[in-house]
Image (tube, helix red, strand yellow):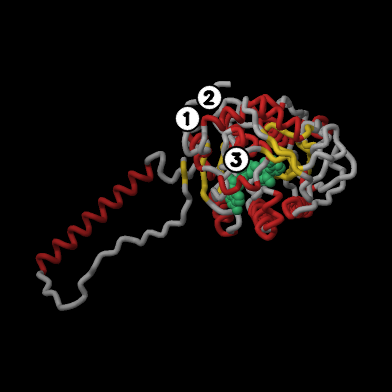
Amino acid sequence: MLNFNRTRTQPRSTRSMSLGGIDYMDPKKKSNVVGKILLAASFTALFILMLKQSPTFNSPSLFSQHEPGVTHVLVTGGAGYIGSHAALRLLKDSHRVTIVDNLSRGNIGAVKVLQELFPEPGRLQFIYADLGDPKAVKKIFSENAFDAVMHFAAVAYVGESTVDPLKYYHNITSNTLIVLEAMAAHGVSTLIYSSTCATYGEPKQMPITEETPQHPINPYGKAKKMAEDIILDFHKNSDMAVMILRYFNVIGSDPEGRLGEAPRPELRVHGRISGACFDAARGIIPGLKVTGTDYKTLDGTCIRDYIDVTDLVDAHVKALEKAKPGKVGIYNVGTGRGRSVNEFVEACKAATRVNIKVDFLPRRPGDYAEVFSDPAKILTELNWTAQHTDLQKSLEVAWRWQKSHRNGYETTLPMASY
Ligand SMILES: NC(=O)c1ccc[n+]([C@@H]2O[C@H](COP(=O)([O-])OP(=O)(O)OC[C@H]3O[C@@H](n4cnc5c(N)ncnc54)[C@H](O)[C@@H]3O)[C@@H](O)[C@H]2O)c1
């Protein structure tokens, strides 16, 4: 059901009434009118009676009631890259899904894909709303019976956050507070929160464990850390089951080619390395700029931990399964293996089969040399480990979708083969 849940503003139908002049009322006519009114009233009563006896009358929406054996998950930001992949997996696992998104960055095309795959009643609904609007959020929670929330919705570009920090504190920190308050008010028992390795800042020691001190160095990381703190403080006096997942660099897309990553063209400038790579391969940008070749790493370029979106979504499902009332789990979601920017570029060239032009430039201020995770805790406690660790393969899958969706979700070309 595509439910663009807008407030109804249509005026009630009004009838023009002549109030001027004095009408002479013929008594015969009067009894005729009374008869007609009585007839209309009895028809209306009969109609209401019939409706009441019909099985669908008074039956609330499937989304508004808890159903034993069905987990209803609110996926905020479900029109976005990671949220849409998570919604697909939840639906495949027979969960009931409500996506809430303001489409500021996501794609209604992704929601349509999901809708076509799961058209049955009570599987998926889409609600167009802004999480920064407390009234809208309250309404959503009062009209739907959620069992869990996966809170993906966020603005998520480090560079943009340094230019427009207030947007980040509003969108990430303040909106998380609004969602959390609504969850508490409506007794929603489980929260899976999308956090980031950016909350760690520039740790002195690698790999990063969950115990590594968090000293974020940009507003994006700070806003996420503040949101984490709000959740953790609230949790001290709550029975909510909370899982905080700190993702490393997310890449890849649905192996079956139904979904992909399609950021708005105007956001390309803030983009992530995989997006830039594909744009270079398609000739949208002239080439790649690798900033910094003199870091203390094996090949001199920065090192990051790239996690495939399929694995990331799997971590969410495991987190949902293992979430326990009154408990909080905090986990790094990464491969545990660092890859240099050079390695990434070579994998991208091989995946796209395009000899992408690469310019090597001096270091960019604010970039840190090396970031990779220690994923031991999530393996021990949630039995999760990354499976899709072949960088080139992950990029091949993503490239296949990119090639057949040159304008993101707006146009679909026949699926390219490898
Ligand atoms: N992509 C990564 O590499 C990465 C890494 C670490 C953490 N994360 C986190 O994962 C989450 C999802 O990121 P993504 O890469 O899928 O981003 P995305 O931009 O593709 O998706 C975010 C979605 O949230 C929606 N949204 C934003 N503000 C909203 C609001 N106020 N109300 C309703 N909807 C709103 C957007 O329209 C979009 O559909 C974010 O919380 C992000 O911080 C992402």
Q: Which residue does the numbered mark 2 point to in the structure image?
A: 416
Where ligand 1 lies, by quadrant? top right
Q: Which residue does the numbered mark 1 point to in the structure image?
A: 413
x, y (%) of residue 312? 70, 34
The kind of residue on which mark 2 rests is Ala
> Which is nearer the eye, 342 or 316?
342
Farthest right residue?
A: 205
Secondary structure category for the residue under label 2: loop
Whichever of labels 3 and 2 marks the residue nearer the N terminus, that label is 3
Q: Which residue does the numbered mark 3 point to in the structure image?
A: 285
Quarter location, residue 326: top right
Secondary structure category for the residue under label 1: loop
CA–CA distance between discs 2 and 1? Answer: 8 Å
Secondary structure category for the residue under label 3: loop
Please give the name of the residue rendered at 11% of the width and 65% of the height, measured from the top-left corner.
29
Question: Circles 2 and 1: CB distance less than 8 Å?
Answer: yes
Q: Which mark is residue 287?
A: none
The kind of residue on which mark 3 rests is Ile
